[in-house]
Amino acid sequence: MTQVLIAAAVIGITGLLIALLLGFAAIQFEVPVDEKEIAVREYLPGNNCGGCGFAGCDALAKAIAAGEAAVNACPVGGAAVAEKIGAVMGVEGGDAVKMVAYVKCAGTCEKAGIKANYYGISDCKRAAAIPGRGDKACSYGCMGFGSCVAACQFNAIHVKQGVAVVDKDNCVACGKCIAECPNGLIELVPYDAKLAVTCSNKDKGPKVMAVCDTGCIGCGICAKQCEFGAVTVENNVAHIDQSKCTGCGKCAEKCPKKIIMAH
């Protein structure tokens, strides 16, 4: 009986010592918690999409609390979340412009030329790594295998008639589709952008027309029509500076290939 009591006492004392040591370690190595960081994190949506440029919502909350990121840095939360986070940080939420993804290609199955029959994995990056890069004759256009669709967490992009199309009401501008597209066809534009160029082919006119009925031929007529300097031709393809565009529509009206369309 005495041995049992001694053993119980030893175990009890050992447990108490361990508890004391753990308590001391917890105090010594305690990491200070920023109350603002916790409050900011509560308002972030938790999608962890990375569209803000940080590893996830926890990382963004820490950056905002430290003053290293803007209160409107979350593309998913938008202006509503920015306002709440701004209140926590004691600053204005800012006029966050809603951005959405846009696919710069209109080369549907009816308009884009076909150079071969592709039999392989339906993945744009894998198809881009092999000779021929899929079945379309235009090497700059949408390959239509839907890698961007698979990357989107918000059901905002779908392949229609061989070309990816963005549902801008569902898009949160996380940028996952942009990173996934091997041809660099997708860019962010303001939600309320009036016009956009639906081509990315950098070849000269004759070569473009040989592979697609709706490609930009780099003629520059659109740029000459714009009174605001919003339209330029770079690397044989038209580009619209959305910060300068007024949506007057003159460029679209005069475009001989009709590749400038309402967004």
Image (cartoon, rainbow, N blue to C red):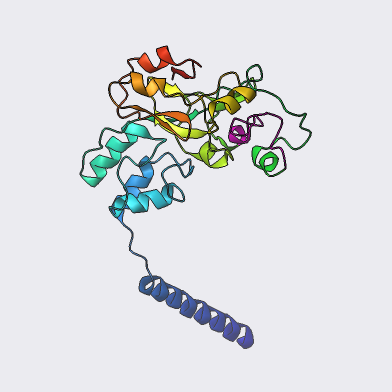
Instruction: Name the residue: 37% across, 24% down.
Output: 223
**Main secondary-structure element of the magenta-colored stretch:** loop
Horizontally, residue 28 falls left or right of residue 92, namely: right
User: Quarter of the image containing the N terminus?
Assistant: bottom right
In the image, residue 146 sits, relative to residue 221, either above or below, namely below
Segment tinted magenta in the rendering: 131-150
Q: Measured from the top left, where is residue 83 in percent x and y? A: 27, 35
In the image, residue 83 sits, relative to residue 18, either above or below, namely above
In the image, residue 114 sits, relative to residue 19, either above or below, namely above
- Which residue is at the front of the view, 187 or 230? 230
User: Quarter of the image containing the C terminus?
Assistant: top left
Q: Can residue 169 be seen in this view?
A: no
Q: Measured from the top left, where is residue 16 in percent x and y? A: 47, 77
Instruction: Name the residue: 25% across, 44% down.
Output: 88
Q: Measured from the top left, where is residue 97 in percent x and y? A: 32, 31
- Which residue is at the front of the view, 5 or 234? 234
Horizontally, residue 72 falls left or right of residue 48, namely: left
Q: Is residue 119 visible?
A: yes
Q: Quadrant of residue 34?
A: bottom left
- Which residue is at the front of the view, 26 or 183? 183
- Which residue is at the front of the view, 150 or 118? 118
Horizontally, residue 176 falls left or right of residue 82, namely: right
Q: Quadrant of residue 144?
A: top right
Q: Which residue is situated farthest in the front direction here?
A: 206
Q: Does the magenta stretch include residue 188?
A: no
Instruction: Name the residue: 63% across, 87% down.
Output: 3
